Image: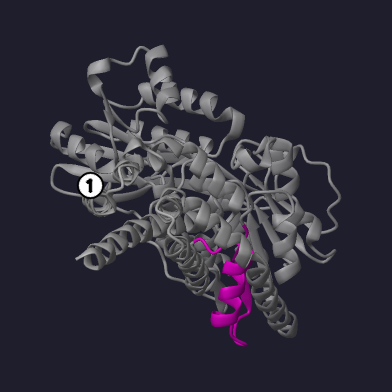
Amino acid sequence: MFELVLALASLLWLGHAVLRLLNGVHMLQLNSYRNERFMGWFKGHVKERLSLREWLPLLSFAALLFQAPMLGLILWTLLYAMLIWLRPRKQEKKKLVYTARVKRLLVTIGVLVAAALAVSLTFASAGDSFAPFILLFAVALLSDMVVLLANTMNLPVENRINRYYLNDAAQIVRQMKHLTVIGITGSYGKTSVKHFLNTLLSQVYEVLVTPESYNTPMGVTKTIRSMLRPTHRFFITEMGAKQTGDIRELCELVSPKIGILTAVGPQHLETFKTLENVQRTKFELGESLPPDGILFMNMDDENIASYRGNIAARKVSIGIHRQDVDYRAQNIQYTGKGAAFELVKPDGSVLACETSLLGEHNIYNLLLSMAVSLELGVPEEKLALLVKRIKPVKHRLELKKLSDKITILDDSFNSNPVGSKAALDVLAQMPGKRILITPGMIELGEQEYELNRKFGIHAAGACDYIILVGQKQTKPIQDGLREAGYPQERLYIARDLQDALRQMHLVAEQGSIVLLENDLPDNYNE
């Protein structure tokens, strides 16, 4: 009987530990396998991860104190069964992907857990009643530290594997002499420009683009090794960065000849620390271009226009509000269904254009894409027609008919100070009841509170009803709304996105337009 209860107690402990370990691996993956970011997540969720509920198995030690091991085992079994049954069940937005790296990590975690079990059995065989239980309890409670330790142990192997793949990808690109690499970077607008430019260039040339948000060295490497073919004439590479040197590393990998700089703003300031670091990092693209290369820049962006670094490549500028640029949009007319504008080219000639894209920021994205296309030989007579065909990128101011009553303005991919303001401006133009659902903006460092407060002030003038997701993280927006005198009865604080969507259906009227502004990943859940 004792052996049966011991086996059941071990299985239930292991089940609880595995659930917590898998959740930790999921959070590590969402934090790009970076230990410092994972620790940042843990510190923000320490009360949840080490909640009083997780300490309940300690009650079973009371029975051991009274020399009642059977009672202790039963209590241990019941308490871990209760923890499994009562564990928080949250709907995951992005599930854990069992990549080769995750599988290697799980093997290492398995070895560590097996070692803990072996040590606990050694203590038990030596007659120690407490040590085996204390050790196993600590492994389950501190499962996130086990994940961190396993990731640290695997780093040398992962770095060697990554280096092999990176070198192989760089060699493939170097061997394709006819291939021109186009690098796109910026604090926002990268993915949109990538898709717009692909639509325009692919009508004339064979073009490969990095899929989805593959904008890291390993994402670009995977694209090169699995998708790049000798027939491709252009390779459009999105380049992301979260710290100084990231863009330079990507440039060393793919050797771009053409660069596109969309915007420089306060993004990822928790790692960049200052806007000057963001600016310097984004311009690593321009400084990496060869003398016969071309750098396309949005000169309406003051953080781009003010840069005084050393760039050998030719510079091509675009803008809306400045006159001294090579390509300019004028006579812009916005509607709730898109915009019409005129493209003024370097020779002064004008090309009339229409687009179904919403917002001024998308005019900038189009201008960059059109300027590159014209410089690379796309016929002018095709360009206006192709621009008219361009569709919004998924989750970036994408209009969706949810029902006869509700239309969704989906801007949920990634919120930033410029894009969020543009989205509110678009919402303000829409007829019907205007509803905002947002958890606010993140990764803005010391400016996060102030930028979200200003967002709240701006939202007050554009929205008939506002649903904020998360009580704590939306505090700056709440402060901005109060400052603007927004009526409390038109504000709802949701627990999570599902709660927000339920409230949306309750308050929506016929003809409502709902702006979904940002959708935080699971590691930002409160």
Rendered location of residue 236, percent (x, y): 60, 68
Position of residue 444 relative to residue 487, above or below, is below
The answer to which image quadrant residue 288 occupies is bottom right
Position of residue 53 relative to residue 110, above or below, is above
Of 221 and 347, which appears nearest the observer? 221
Of 338 and 141, which appears nearest the observer? 141
Position of residue 514 relative to residue 310, above or below, is above
Rendered location of residue 110, percent (x, y): 46, 69
Label 1 SS: loop
The answer to which image quadrant residue 164 occupies is bottom right
Q: Is residue 392 visible?
A: no
Residue lying at 59% horizontally and 28% vertically, measured from the top left: 447
Which quadrant is the N terminus positioned in? bottom left
Rendered location of residue 205, percent (x, y): 57, 78
Of 170 and 95, which appears nearest the observer? 95
Q: How many marks?
A: 1
The residue labelled by disc 1 is 86
Of 333 and 12, which appears nearest the observer? 12
Q: Is residue 328 visible?
A: yes
Please say whether residue 230 is one of the residues in the magenta stretch.
Answer: yes
Drawn side of residue 237 relative to residue 423, left or right: right
Which quadrant is the C terminus positioned in? top left
Rendered location of residue 500, percent (x, y): 25, 37
- Identify the amino acid type marked 1: Leu
Residue lying at 56% horizontally and 54% vertically, measured from the top left: 190
Magenta segment, which residues? Answer: 213-239
